[in-house]
């Protein structure tokens, strides 16, 4: 087990290195941070060159890359061109907002999708199943900015039950979580339904039923637990991408998350922030993946990690 | 039977969901002009207001910024020797008076008895420190420095007298001294607490002091009790809330969570007007939009073709139909607020026959294709581009619209002359003097001028820089605008109008032309 984790950590280093190469060079393909800086002001060509030199952008690319890697080894991503703040500080300021929104979305998705998916599978072909499948389809098809704005209109403007935007209290978390969770629950409910169906057709289910165990006990203990495996994989991967990929929801609800930080940085070509943000997300993604793999052993004791598997 | 019932129920629920969604969208549009009879949702906010803004600058140090979002807040925190009023008049601010001793020496008498928010005194030393910082190593790293290179040094004559020594006459200097980079900062505070602290905790002499700053969320300003102008400011507290999405910002306004909304979109104007407790305020800005030509590329290297395209487009119709009338026509690449604007020039009229005739004279074949580059994040401009494509088709030209990332367009494609035959250009011109805009747009070799060159234009550009006599400069600009009008280096589309929505509990709020909110006179009911 320990050796397995160490090996995975080494993989992670490789992943981060490759990503550092890709991100460093790809963001330099188009655009120029210094021109952007002046695009709403007025500046002569000389002034632009001077600022470029001050930011170290006049150095050859390999030298700039070396500086970046050197900082990376000590988790120092440099300072934002725009705010002058250390990138690490900027990321940490937003980590909590991002984490709570991703968790909120996952929780809402689970609360909706598990009952819907399980009921659909158990009552396959019934009205419940029909409704469940329509629900998933609608969930998948909703554009999330539209859903977000509709929720604001209904719950913030008309009913005035919840705040429309901001990041201050638990109430503020509800609408963005529902927006994110609804979209996610569409796919998740389908996944739960199909894995449940697969499991429920197994012979051991019939055996359990014939032993006289109550129906729901069979479904939950024998059925659901076994159907959980693909679901956990899916949720793990989704959680990773939710950390950086909630930009639209963040935008609608004025949520100060890492996704918005990176998008703003891309628009400004704020290289240190883009590099730091992407590397940070990559690390999270790899760690989440590892945790997902480890969780398999908890759900299904037959799965072993390491060489003996 | 049971199955059938369930199916009906679920179908009904889906139907209800869709209906709810539809009616939600519909009622936002508003019908007609009758004000709704709604009660004001703000009842218990006291002597405070909340302002919903689109973004914040991330950095409050005046020498590190160039963003309008900075000035929206920081204009209440910092002050310069000169100030520009809401009506765009220049007058002494922290200075009591000024005098040009000669073409390159400008002397300021300072107001006495003013303190920074931290208690430091404002005096000649503080002025010298602020400009040494702006013009020195620290300032040269930032985007403000380049506006102030005509200043050679600032000298302290006595505690409340300073002299600016210039290395060249600068006709726009007084305006620039009312600009972002020229505000006066507290020397001891900046030196002792360091630069990073100053980025996040700005201290100035303004009517409000910043007491809280949560990045990308909220900024809180509180009344400066020791403000040098008697009886001001009138509010106790102003909170800025960052809400990037326009429809969310409007929701916050409708529910009374904010009192003033910046950047109301054209499509939202009617629902603000319909509301019983909101007021829509519009104000002309210095920002202008044009489709610029790459004058090095055939066929738009021919002035007749450029004029033809100008005649072919009905700009009035575009303004009315797409911009809802919120915009003003322009004849050259500057707003009516700009010094150097020529009110005698009428924009090119819509004359499709003349356009066809000019294209024929220039020998442009029917169906010739032009590439047009526009930024992908501007919804209104996409519609404008489609309208332009329609008009050009009428004139016998084909237009390919390329929608690209705004940053790539402005910082890469345009400077490298890779933005097709025409591209969208928006320009602010904060000095409100045609000098800056004209120089950077038409002087050969400038960053955003990859191809235009004309000897007469160069001559006039140089001439207006060599004098501080404003009458003479006005005459030169008159000639310059006429020359540019004939050369038609762009299709000038419109001057932007800013829309603000204000809760009617807020009184004495006048929207600024250039995003620099002034709040000291604002009161609440």
Image (cartoon, grey):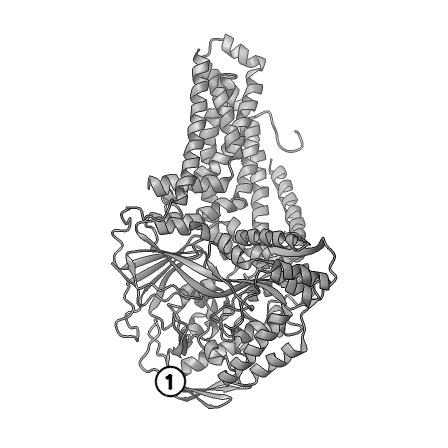
Above-or-below relation of B437 to B43 = below
Q: Which residue occupies 39% across, 58% down?
A: B500
Q: Which residue occupies 66% across, 58% down?
A: A28
Could you tell me residue A16's position as x and y percent? 63, 49
Could you tell me residue A225's position as x and y percent? 52, 23
Q: Chain of mark 1?
A: B
What is the quadrant of residue A301 in the picture? Answer: top right
Q: Is residue B57 visible?
A: no
Q: Quadrant of the N terminus of chain B?
A: top left
Q: Is residue A149 visible?
A: yes
Q: Which of the two residues, B175 or B67, is positioned nearer the viewer here?
A: B175
Q: Which of the two residues, A14 or A215, is positioned nearer the viewer here?
A: A215
What is the quadrant of residue B117 in the picture? Answer: bottom left
Could you tell me residue A243's position as x and y percent? 52, 44
Q: Which of the two residues, B455 or B215, is positioned nearer the viewer here?
A: B455
Which residue corresponds to mark 1?
A: B97
What is the quadrant of residue B412 in the picture? Answer: bottom right
Above-or-below relation of B210 to B6 = below
Could you tell me residue B56's position as x and y percent? 45, 59
Element type at marker 1? strand
Q: Residue furthest bottom?
A: B102
Label 1 Cα neighbours within 10 Å, binned few <14 / some 14-19 / many ≥20: some
């Amino acid at each position: 087990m320990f050796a397995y984790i160490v090996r995975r950590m080494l993989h992670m280093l490789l992943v981060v290195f490759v990503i550092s190469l890709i991100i460093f060079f790809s963001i330099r393909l188009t655009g120029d941070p210094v021109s952007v800086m002046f695009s709403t002001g007025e500046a002569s060509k000389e002034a632009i060159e001077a600022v470029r030199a001050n930011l170290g952008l006049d150095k050859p690319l390999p030298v700039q890359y070396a500086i970046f890697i050197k900082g990376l080894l000590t988790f120092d991503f440099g300072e934002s061109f725009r705010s002058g703040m250390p990138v690490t500080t900027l990321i940490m300021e937003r980590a909590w907002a991002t984490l709570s929104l991703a968790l909120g979305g996952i929780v809402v998705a689970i609360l909706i999708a598990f009952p819907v998916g399980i009921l659909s599978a158990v009552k396959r072909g019934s009205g419940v199943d029909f409704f469940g499948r329509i629900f998933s389809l609608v969930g998948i098809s909703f554009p999330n900015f539209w859903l977000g704005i509709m929720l604001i209109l209904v719950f913030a403007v008309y009913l005035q039950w919840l705040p429309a935007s901001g990041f201050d209290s638990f109430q503020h978390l509800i609408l963005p979580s529902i927006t994110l969770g609804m979209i996610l629950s569409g796919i998740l409910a389908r996944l739960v339904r199909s894995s449940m169906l697969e499991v429920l057709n197994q012979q051991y289910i019939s055996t359990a039923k014939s032993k006289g165990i109550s129906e729901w006990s069979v479904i939950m203990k024998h059925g659901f637990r076994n159907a959980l495996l693909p679901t956990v994989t899916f949720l793990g991967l989704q959680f990773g991408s939710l950390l950086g990929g909630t930009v639209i929801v963040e935008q609608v609800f004025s949520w100060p998350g890492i996704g918005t930080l990176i998008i703003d940085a891309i628009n400004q070509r704020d290289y240190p922030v883009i590099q730091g943000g992407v590397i940070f997300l990559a690390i999270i993604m790899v760690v989440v993946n590892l945790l997902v793999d480890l969780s398999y052993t908890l759900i299904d004791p037959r799965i072993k990690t390491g060489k003996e598997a | 039977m049971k199955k059938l019932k369930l199916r009906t129920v679920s179908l009904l629920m889906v139907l209800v969901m869709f209906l709810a969604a539809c009616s939600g969208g519909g009622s936002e549009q508003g019908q007609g002009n009758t004000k709704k009879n709604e009660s004001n949702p703000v009842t218990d906010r006291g002597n405070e207001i909340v302002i919903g803004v689109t973004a914040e600058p991330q950095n409050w140090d005046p020498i590190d910024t160039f963003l309008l979002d900075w000035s929206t807040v920081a204009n209440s925190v910092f002050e310069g020797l000169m100030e520009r009023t809401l009506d765009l008049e220049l007058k002494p601010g922290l200075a009591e008076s000024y005098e040009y001793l000669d073409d390159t020496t400008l002397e300021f008498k300072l107001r006495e008895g003013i303190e920074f928010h931290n208690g430091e005194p404002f005096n000649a030393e503080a002025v010298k420190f602020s400009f040494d910082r702006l013009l020195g190593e620290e300032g040269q790293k930032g985007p403000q420095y380049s506006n102030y290179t005509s200043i050679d040094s600032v000298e302290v004559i006595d505690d409340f007298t300073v002299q600016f020594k210039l290395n060249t006459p600068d006709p726009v200097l007084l305006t620039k001294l009312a600009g972002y980079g020229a505000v006066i900062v507290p020397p001891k505070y900046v030196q002792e607490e360091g630069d990073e602290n100053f980025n996040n905790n700005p201290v100035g002499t303004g009517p409000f002091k910043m007491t809280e700053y949560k990045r990308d969320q909220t900024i809180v300003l509180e009344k400066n009790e020791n403000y040098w102008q008697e009886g001001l400011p009138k509010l106790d507290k102003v909170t800025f809330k960052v809400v990037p999405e326009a429809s969310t910002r409007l929701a916050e306004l409708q529910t009374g969570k904010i009192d003033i909304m910046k950047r109301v979109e054209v499509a939202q104007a009617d629902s603000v007007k319909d509301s019983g407790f909101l007021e829509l305020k519009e104000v002309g800005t210095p920002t202008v939009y044009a489709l610029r030509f790459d004058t090095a590329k055939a066929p738009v290297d021919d002035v007749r073709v450029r004029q033809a395209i100008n005649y072919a487009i009905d700009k009035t119709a575009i303004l009315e139909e797409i911009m809802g009338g919120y915009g003003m026509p322009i004849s050259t690449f500057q707003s009516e607020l700009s010094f150097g604007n020529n009110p005698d020039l009428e924009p090119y009229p819509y004359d499709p026959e003349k356009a066809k005739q000019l294209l024929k004279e220039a020998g442009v074949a029917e169906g010739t294709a032009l590439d047009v580059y526009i930024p992908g994040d501007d919804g209104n401009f996409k519609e404008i581009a489609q309208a332009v494509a329609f008009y050009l088709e009428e004139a016998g030209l084909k237009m390919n619209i390329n929608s690209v990332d705004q940053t790539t367009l402005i910082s890469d494609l345009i400077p490298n002359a890779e933005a097709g035959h025409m591209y969208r250009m928006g320009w602010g011109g904060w000095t409100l003097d045609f000098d800056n805009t004209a120089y950077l747009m038409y002087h050969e070799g400038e960053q955003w001028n990859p191809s235009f060159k004309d000897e007469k234009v160069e001559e006039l550009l140089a001439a207006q820089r060599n004098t501080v006599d404003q009458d003479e400069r006005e005459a030169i600009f008159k000639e310059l605008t006429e020359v540019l009008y004939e050369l038609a280096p762009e299709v000038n589309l419109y001057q932007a109008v800013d829309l603000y929505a204000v809760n009617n509990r807020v009184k004495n709020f006048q929207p600024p032309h250039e995003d620099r909110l002034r709040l000291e006179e604002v009161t609440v009911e």
